[in-house]
Amino acid sequence: MKTDEEPITFEIVYERIKDNIKDTEELLKIKEAYFFALDKHKGMKRLTGEDFITHPLHVADIVNSLNVDATTIIGALLHEVMNNGETALSEIEEKFGNTVATIVDSITKINKLELVDDSESSAIYLRKVLVGLATDVRVLFIKLADRLHNMRTNYAINPKKQKQKAYETMAVLIPIAHRLGINSIKSELEDLCLYYTKPDVYKDIFEKLNETQKELKDSLEEMEESITDILTEQGLKFKIKGRVKSVHSIYNKLSSGKKWNEIYDILALRVILESVSDCYLAVGLVHAKYRPIPNRFKDYIAMPKANMYQSLHTTVFGVDGHLFEVQFRTYEMDEFAEKGMASHWSYKEHGTKKVQNIMEQKLEMFRNLIETHEEVDDLAFARDVTSDMLAEMIYVFTPKGDVMELPRGSTPIDFAYRIHSDVGDKTVGAIVNDTIVPLNHELENNDIVKIKTNPNSSPNKDWLNFVKTSQAKNKIKSYFSKQEHAFMIEKGKNILEKELRKRKLAFQDIMNDENIKKILKDLKLKDLDDIYLSIGTLRYTAGFIITLTTDNKALVEDALIEKVNNRPQTIGNYKNDIIVAGIGDILVNLAKCCKPVKGDDITGFITKGQGITIHRKNCPNILDQKDRLIDVSWNYQNDSTYTTDLYIETDNNKNYLSDIIATFTKRNVHIDSFKAKEYTNYYIYEVTIKVKNKEEVERIILDFEMLSFVGSVSREYL
């Protein structure tokens, strides 16, 4: 098998790019990206002995073959400049814009991930994180092209690493290529992986194909001529391609229990026509001359595959007694079959309606998840993307026949939100296949779904218990978040007005423009609504806000200390996580310096104008502040989560990012942020996590202390 490639130059790739990209400014930007990468990789070599720049050139050439946009090509040319060119993200953003910078940053993070082991759970997890880190679907196109070129040159690394990369490709990247429908990359990766993981099997199949190559080629040509004559007589315009099935495809048949002499449909023909009606006419004409094999006709045009592949498949008894698989599809379907989701850019204006509709849904799903990324932790985001992107899909229809792609288990509410958020918000009922169904009804393939709406209706919180798609969940949560936001603002305003009346103060005298500006500056708030919101959510008391309008900050502290010291001690069900001197409803903040969690020994510190801040007792920032400390304790009746930091020191044999993430995952610990710093002899990983209590932190620390590559782990900076 040929696993390397012909020499490549920018001039060769650029000529191919010009067939795809016509805009002069975009072409100039692509040139600029190439020369930028050339400068950054100057003097670097690949293990093959080639200049390093040949790798991004090949990757750009591969993604260009998918008819992607200029941004994807630029990202492909620049995808290694941060990792192997020591380029700052800010420099990329300055020269090529935020979108390209985000794509390059995502690729850089993804390329640091590796499988922890050969287990299926590890592969699924890495697939989730990989897709989660790909904040733009074009990142996945580049990653797949990057892996394809690396697999073509896989011979240059040691045999153990060759197999490791092949297994990782099979477990993680080929499923993603399949899900995105990029068959041209998926098929080649499958053959390459078989070549490295089972070289003897690959060689055996390859040699058997070679033995019969002339006979097979002659039969293909004769069958091709025959079908050409049949279709030409009917005045159809078409292209026809013949091929022998791939080594991996034959290997799959052998693996299913078939023997070599039982594999009849090694020969395949693809007929590409101008319209869907031509496809159905053509298959009928071929069946009229060549007898089809029973139960081998598949209509993937009316019912697309899970990755939206469309084609008509049939197997017929052809010339020389051979069986031929013949596929019939339109040009748009063929483009999509080879290039998958990437072909969206080529056919977005005039593509097949169903395919375009599904692609828009996929891209909208990505956009929706990206918009909500900041509201959830990274692992929850990865789970959302995976559940929508890599789940088993069903295809249902609107009453007008438009197809909608949804994860299996979806309900009419998921369907409604996939149409539009306003439709989802106003849904009151659903009719599936002319039958009224409950809103939690699970949809099936081929269902025809009609949504009933009422302009006066709104979402129901109970929907969150059964909706499947992250899009629907996020839209429902967003609706109630906005409602709650508005309610808290109104509540805060009422509390403030009531407190002012109690003190016999005029609203316009206290909340004038000058005082509002002062409050906003002191508390770092945005506007008047933010002040009301802070009162409504009990972040600040109305009295505290009023006191801020004076110039004497000491009044604030004195009032707080007096309240703590003089209020009678109470016991009961407190709303807050911290009980201050027996009082459960005083606003407190957890210190960002030491990040205490439930179970830590803690103390309260009265700050100037900022209420009470809770520190761990051993926090160095409060050791010399005895006069301003007050007794506080945890409210163990509340079940909250807390954010804290872990600092993990490892050896410098390799980047242990995926190993560390896997360790947290086994404990179902959510990661808020992740930073890695490389030193001469070691790495320091600074990880911010969400936990329930100190015991959970201690269990996690113990997990890491058991790992051979971990030198130390602590909640304090090492």
Image (cartoon, rainbow, N blue to C red):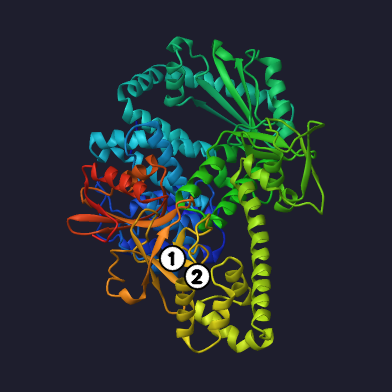
Q: Tag 2, which secondary structure?
A: loop
Q: Residues within 10 Å of mark 1 (few under 14, many from 20)?
A: some
- What mark, if any, has residue 389 been given in the picture? none
Query: Which residue: 38% across, 17% down?
Result: 208
- What mark, if any, has residue 581 been given in the picture? 1
Q: Which residue is mark 2?
A: 567
Viewer-nearest residue: 13 or 696: 696
Q: Amino acid at mark 2?
A: Arg
| Left or right of 235, for residue 454 | right
Q: Position of residue 453 (x, y in %)?
A: 80, 47
Q: Tag 1, which secondary structure?
A: loop
Viewer-nearest residue: 383 or 590: 590
Q: Position of residue 700 (x, y in %)?
A: 32, 46
Identify whether 208 is placed above or below 569: above
Q: Quadrant of residue 683?
A: bottom left
**Residue 693 seen from this side:** yes
Query: Which residue: 71% across, 39% down?
Result: 412
Mark earlier in primary sequence (1, 2) = 2
| Left or right of 622, for residue 454 | right
Identify whether 146 is placed above or below 334: below
Q: Position of residue 305 (x, y in %)?
A: 61, 31
Q: Amino acid at mark 1?
A: Ala
